[in-house]
Amino acid sequence: MYNPFSLKDKTVFITGASSGIGKAVAIECSRMGSRLCITGRNAERLNETYMQLEGSGHLQLVADLQSEDAIRSVVDRVPVLDGIVYCAGIARPLPFQFTGKETLEEVMGINFNSPVILSQLLLENKKIKKGASIVFISSVSGVFCSSAGGSIYSASKGAINGLVKGMALDLAPKMIRVNTVNPGMIDTNIFSEGTITQEQLTEDIKRYPLKRFGKPEEVAYSVIYLLSDASSWVTGSSLLIDGGFTLL
Amino acid sequence: MELINFVKDFAELFEETDANFFKPSTKFRDIEEWSSLVALSVIAMAFVKYKVRLSGDDIRKSLTIEDIFNIVKAKQ
Ligand SMILES: NC(=O)c1ccc[n+]([C@@H]2O[C@H](COP(=O)([O-])OP(=O)(O)OC[C@H]3O[C@@H](n4cnc5c(N)ncnc54)[C@H](OP(=O)(O)O)[C@@H]3O)[C@@H](O)[C@H]2O)c1
């Protein structure tokens, strides 16, 4: 059947696959025919994702990406890749005055440093094929807007958007494409630690012209586009998916 | 941990409201300056000064400064 978005015969590596957006990306990519290597910190939830993958030959690797040793062991174990999707990330809502080195290291460590180090090591170890596609889950935050207590998180996402432009240029000779997806609020576990209340989130929904938060699958569909040959002339770009949030 | 010190720490999170205005019985949501950012600051202050992790819900179910103090104390 004609399908320019097919991921058949593509091997894709996904971080943050144990929850939320990464989980949906993994499941939807498997439905599009790709072979997956998924990673996450929580073994039980990562396995739940693994059990929901369609097709066969998938691989799961439990790893805490704050640790460089863990990153190295992941790089050793991943197969040669046609695609990478960086979904692992945290939000630590904290007013700027209360942020310090610890928050900076924690948030930048997982949201920015880990995908950078992973990419460098994967390239060094020849694990990224010519013509591959790399997708970063950035955000509207730090690129188009921010939120109360979101300074460091925004910085980490703004940094990703900057990185991608330079990376796209430097990897163009290898025909490797590098892009970001920038979602508005998506229904996931990202605020499950409870600093932001359900009540505040319900209030926030009213600020979305399309009157709801996004679903993880809706981010996954755009990632599929960027991984597929349908986007083979797209690099260094950012795809905004926000229900119209940044229009207002 | 003393209630009076907690009220002082709480008052310091505000820019415009006079420090003398703050009493244990103050209904913090009625303060004009109250916002979701100040709520985040209360959570951050409780962690920095009292090593207690408050949740957004702890703030939501509190009415007065003393209510928050009692939660912080119970969690210590
Ligand atoms: N939800 C939103 O509204 C939204 C909006 C814009 C952008 N984003 C971005 O989308 C990405 C995914 O977020 P989400 O909403 O799906 O959040 P989520 O449900 O909380 O999932 C976060 C994922 O990151 C993984 N992770 C966190 N710290 C890690 C570490 N140290 N090592 C390895 N993995 C780690 C988690 O693994 P474990 O669960 O196994 O610990 C989990 O799989 C993040 O980059 C986030 O910034 C989210």
Image (tube, coloured by chain):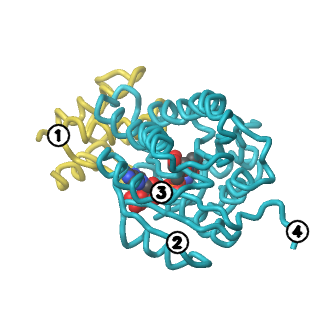
Chain colours: A cyan, B yellow
Q: Which residue is mark 4?
A: A2
Distance of mark 3 from mark 1, alpha carbons? 43 Å
- Distance from mark 3 CB to nearest ligand 1 atom below 8 Å: yes
Say what secondary structure mark 1 lies in: helix
Q: Quadrant of residue A145?
A: top right
Q: Quadrant of the C terminus of chain A?
A: top right
Q: Quadrant of residue A186?
A: bottom right
Mark toward the viewer: 4 or 3: 4
Vertical comparison of A23 with A145: above or below? below
Q: Which residue is mark 3?
A: A16
For mark 2, does the 10 Å Cα neighbourhood hold few (<14), some (14 to 19), or many (20 or more) residues? some
Q: Are marks 3 and 2 on the same chain?
A: yes
Between discs 3 and 2, the one toward the N terminus:
3
Mark 4 vs 1: CB contact within 8 A: no
Distance of mark 4 from mark 3, alpha carbons? 31 Å
Q: Identify which residue is drawn at 40% across, 64% down.
A: A61
